[in-house]
Amino acid sequence: MEFKKHITFKNMEKSEVMHKYADEKLAHIEDFLSHERTPIFIELVLEASKTREHPKIELRIKTPHYDEFVSTEHDGTPFYEALDHVLDVMYRRLLEKKQRLVDEKKWIGRHEAFKKQR
C-alpha cells in the first residue's frame, strides 16, 4: 500500500527525532487505512510559536472514503502531547466514519430485502 505522506515543520528546524516519532504514531493510522483504495494522502503540519511554547499541529487525511482534518493549538502543551492528541482524535473520527459507512451498507441491504417482501 502506498501512502503519500508529507510531514512539514514550520517556524522550527526539522527534527529527526520528532519526524521519527510522528512517523511511528502515523503507522497506527496507516494500518487502519491499509485496506482503503488509493490514492491516500496524509499531511501533518507541526508549527512552533515564535514567542512561547504554543504548538499548532494539523493533520489531514484524504482518501476516496475519508476527508478528515484535525487541528490543535494549546498554550503550554508540549509538542509530543499535542501530537498524540491530534492523532487520537483523528483515529476516533476515522473509526466513527467507518462505522457509519458499514451501518449505511447494512441499512441499504435491509431496505432492499424489505422491498422484495412487499
Image (spheres, rainbow, N blue to C red):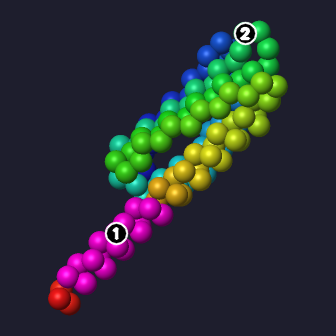
Q: Quadrant of the C terminus?
A: bottom left
Which numbered dot is residue 44?
none
- Whether residue 42 is visible, yes or no, is yes
Image height check: is 104 above or below 94? below
Image-quadrant location for residue 21: top right
- Say whether residue 76 is left or right of residue 107: right
Where residue 34 sits: x, y (%)? 47, 55
Kind of residue indicated by mark 1: Lys
Please give the name of the residue rendered at 77% of the width and 24% of the height, measured from the top-left corner.
75
Q: Which residues are magenta?
A: 99-115
Q: Is residue 110 magenta?
A: yes
The residue identified by callout 2 is 50
Image height check: is 106 above or below 89? below
Q: Of the residues tagged 2 and 1, which is closer to the observer? A: 1
Q: Nearer the viewer, residue 113 or 87?
A: 113
Where residue 55 sits: x, y (%)? 71, 24
Q: Is residue 1 magenta?
A: no
